[in-house]
Image (cartoon, rainbow, N blue to C red):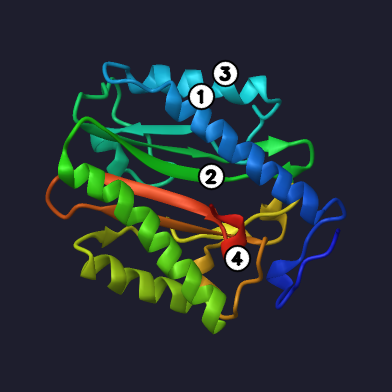
Amino acid sequence: MSEALQESPLEAVGNAFDTEKMLFVRDRTRTALQTIAGRVVPGMVEEDAVEMAKDVLASLDMLQGWHGVYVRFGPNTMKTFGAESDPGVILGKDDVFFIDIGPVWQKWEGDSGETFAVGSDPLMQRAVIDVETLFHTVRRLWLTTGTTGKALYEFAVAEAERMGWELNMDLSGHRLSDFPHAAIYDGPLADVDFRPAPLLWVLEIHIRHPERGFGAFYEDMLLGDEYFS
């Protein structure tokens, strides 16, 4: 397949767009993320984890990325996209980290983000569950109601607060396509005033604890339930 449903010029795609290839790269990106996560251990310095992540992506021919490779430990999980991490942060025995990768494989973009807790801190463990739960709650609202991108994030802000978290609106979704999507639209999903089409948009959820100084992140494409196990 080489076509996607389009509601707006913001959903235009390039000549290389291919639905099957986009889904293939999604799976490849998610596999890379889980491989990286499996190699992160307490006592590791964040900068070393980033270099390890780059090695994993290089082994999969995905070193080129449309954005940088992020592995955030502890207090750096509060940082927004593109912000420099505080240097030298070491992952503790009871801690939290997230991974955010946006690799390109051949002509197609991938993007995946997920949070993991180590040890037994109950609030950090809850953050891992809550951020993914909130992602799917918002995704299912999109799936069932035809809600605009703007309304999705208005809902997400209120739902995050109800769950006891603050939603970081600096990370509020974006396009994805054959490389580079930025040639079509480089703005946030939260500004979109129409129902975003499947496969073309990434829903990002970044929650922060209002007092503890850590956050959690989860992102994936807007897709139907059948694509999530």
Crowdedness of circle 4 by 10 Å Cα count: few (<14), some, many (20+)?
A: some
Q: Amino acid at mark 3?
A: Asp
- Mark toward the start of the polypeptide (2 vs 3): 3
Label 4 or label 3, whichever lies nearer to me, is 4
Residue 69 in sight here? no
User: Quick one: label 2, few (<14), some, or many (20+) residues within 10 Å?
Assistant: many
* Mark seen at residue 53: 1
- What residue is shown at x 56% (from left), y 64% (from top)? 225
Q: Position of residue 162 (x, y in %)?
A: 22, 70
Mark found first going from the N terminus, 1 or 2:
1
Whole-number angstrom distance, CA of label 4 to CA of label 3? 32 Å
- Amino acid type at mark 1: Ala
For the residues bearing labels 2 and 4, Cβ distance under 8 angstroms: no
Q: Can I make out residue 78 in this image?
A: yes
Where does label 3 land, which residue? 55
In the rendered image of this protein, does residue 161 appear above or below residue 205? below
Residue at left offset 74%, top offset 44%: 108
Comes first in the chain, label 1 or label 4: 1
Residue 185 at x, y = what percent?
65, 61
Instruction: Tell me the number on the disc at residue 224.
Output: 4
Picture coordinates of residue 194 (x, y %)?
A: 59, 80
